[in-house]
Image (tube, rainbow, N blue to C red):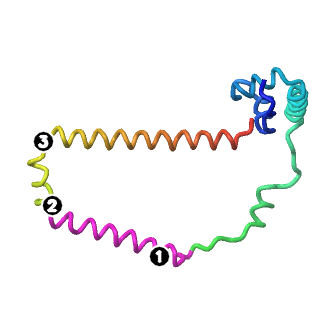
Amino acid sequence: MNNIHPYEKELQQYALDKSDSNPEVIAHIELCPDCKAEISTYQMLFSEIKEQPAAAFDFDLRELVLSKLPKTQTRLSTDDIIAGFLIVFTCSCIGIPVYVFRKIILNTFIDIPPIFIYSIIISTTGILIIEILSLYKKYIKQMHLLNFN
């Protein structure tokens, strides 16, 4: 048995949904009477919270909160202007030479065997897919942390 008790967050996760918990945490909790007592307390607390009726306000909460927020300015800030200039400048530095030398650029790819071009396209697509999937997994994990239920 592991003598180190799980963190409160792990105990709460176990109380909410045992299947999402780490197997080491599950094994510890099943053998530790102190952790079992905390789990039963959390389960009772969570069940009582779920039984509470939804809050009903006699005023418009949305309007009350929105009136307290500072008004946003619609003018462009200097950071927005600089960022826009950098985007236009970068696109110009790339776009103008590509347009001027488009025939030369196209002719450079004529002598390359198609297998190399296909391998570059496939490897780039694979890397992009892996990166997009990792970003999606991170997004799902963050959303799961935000959705406590």
Name the amino acid type tagged 2. Answer: Arg
* 26 and 118: which is toward the camera: 26
Mark 3 sits on what residue? 113
| Residue 93, picture quadrant | bottom left
| Residue 18, picture quadrant | top right
Q: Quick one: label 1, few (<14), some, or many (20+) residues within 10 Å?
A: few
> Residue 47: which numbered mark, if any?
none
**Residue depicted at x 85% and y 24%:** 32
Mark 2 sits on what residue? 102
Q: Nearer the viewer, mark 2 or mark 3?
A: 3
Under circle 2, the secondary element is helix
Q: Quick one: label 3, few (<14), some, or many (20+) residues within 10 Å?
A: few
> Residue 81: which numbered mark, if any?
1
Please state if 76 lies on the left or on the right of 128 as rendered. Answer: right
Q: Position of residue 135 (x, y in %)?
A: 51, 44
Under circle 3, the secondary element is loop
Label 2 vs 1, first from the N-terminus = 1
Q: Quick one: label 2, few (<14), some, or many (20+) residues within 10 Å?
A: few
* 133 and 26: which is toward the camera: 26
Label 3 vs 1, first from the N-terminus = 1
**Residue depicted at x 87% and y 32%:** 42
- Identify the main secondary structure in magenta: helix
